[in-house]
Image: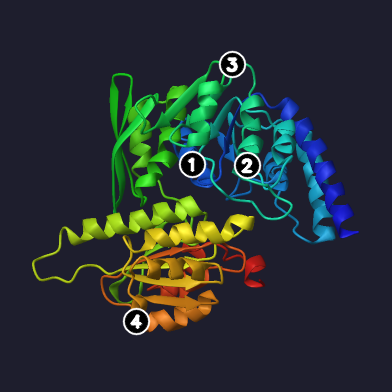
Amino acid sequence: MKNFLKKLVLFILKRLAIDRMKKFTGKVIAVTGTAGKTSTKDAIFAVLNTQFKVKRNEKSMNSDFGLLLTILDIPSGFSSALTWFWLLIKAAFNSLFKDHSEILLLEYGVDKPGDMDFLTSVARPDVAIMTNIYPGHLDSGQFENVEGIFSEKSKLAYALKPNGKLILNTDNSFLYDFEKNWKKKGVITFGKNEEADYLISSAKTSLDGVNFMITHHDIKMHVSAPIVGGYQCYVLTPAIICADLFAIPLQNALNTLTKFRLPPGRMNVIEGVNGSTILDGSYNASPEVVKESLKALHDVAKEADSVLKKGDKPHRRIAVLGNMNELGDDAKTLHELVGAEVKDSADVLITVGGNAKLIGEIALGKGMDEKSVFYFNTSVEAAEFFKKKIEEGDIILVKGSQNNVRLEKFVKEIMARPEDAKKLLVRQEKVWEKL
């Protein structure tokens, strides 16, 4: 019965959303990819919202329900039938009126085959952005392999309106090949390969943020933002491209990004106890992003060490890594591949969860000191153990998937000011407190 009601609510919301979209006269920008969707969407919003009225998905509301709720300007009723009853009335009322936003900025997430068909049947984009294609959503009932993920996400490109623009990160092998075989006009590429329309170079990161260069034709731009990780250049560059497409002066866009902040749990810098520093990536995790996060840990510690006085103790690099979910039959292999990267980036490794233990075992096999590797079943257990061992100057990377890992609980325990948790951490709403 509950499943029937869910399908009924989804059907009604879809019909209402389609009716409202028929009245919409602005532009639709859609963002998809395995990782970085929300951060990319928010960077684009920060830039475009300086000159246009932009509406976006709240947080990571990128599923079928998330898209419809965004279009209809209503929140979720979660599991309350009574709440949904009143929300459907409000949605029906809202569908009668035109959305006066100039740009509708939407994040398209897919968990299984057919999801993108649903999303594009409601809102076709004028601009489509594909960030990357990596392993994820490979559990039973999801995708069989990475090729299946790519096939589903690439449907966004085929859903483009006439004369639409397709923005691709061609440092990703799937998207590079896709661009080479794309027969239509309107493709804009970005990345570090020399063929990219927006060429990224000289990316550097520290605890103060990231900076890099973009070259477009004969224009060179220096981009900087107070967000950690060299890989954040792939988050910020689409915002510059969109500024170009919508005729926003590039210097204005660059100035806006100098104040851009990521949503909670996306490698935010938080002050930890005993003079430590936390790199909070607790929102979610996938293999490629964890590897990039480890590299960021290495890079920011190296930069921090470079300004130490003679005789000062180097910053200790600590990686707290949880299970990476939804990897299906490839889970063991992908956790082990992450483990192979740890020794070069971290001095101490703490794992949370059964699969994450594989990361530690491989790190030991690569020569990491067994006295520096610790295994725990839960985030709370890990925090209770480690909080007493934190030293001044420690830089602590925290990265893991959300379900059954919840590393934001670990971060809260080692924050210098846990009273700021609701403002700085993910999943602090009451609905999450019950889980």
Mark 3 or mark 1, which is nearer the start of the sequence?
1
- Report crowding for label 2: few under 14, some 14 to 19, many 20 or more residues within 10 A (C-alpha): many
Q: How is the image coloured?
A: rainbow
At a point 23% along the width and 58% down the height, the residue shown is 302
- Mark 4 and mark 2 lie on one chain; the one further toward the N terminus is 2
Q: Secondary structure at mark 1?
A: helix
Q: Amino acid at mark 3?
A: Asn
Q: Nearer the viewer, mark 4 or mark 2?
A: 2
Q: Which residue is mark 2?
A: 149
Mark in front: 4 vs 1: 4
Q: CA distance from mark 2 to mark 1?
A: 19 Å
Give the residue number, with chain letter if any, for mark 4. Answer: 389
Amino acid carrying label 1: it is Thr
Residue neighbourhood size for the residue with mark 3, other residues' Cα within 10 Å, grouped as few (<14), some (14–19), many (≥20): few
In the image, residue 400 sits, relative to residue 87, either above or below, namely below
Quote the CA–CA distance across marks 4 and 2: 41 Å
Q: Is residue 389 in sight in this rendering? A: yes
Is residue 327 in sight in this rendering? no
Q: Residue furthest front?
A: 365
Which is nearer the eye, 132 or 367?
Answer: 367
Which of labels 3 and 2 is toward the front? Answer: 2
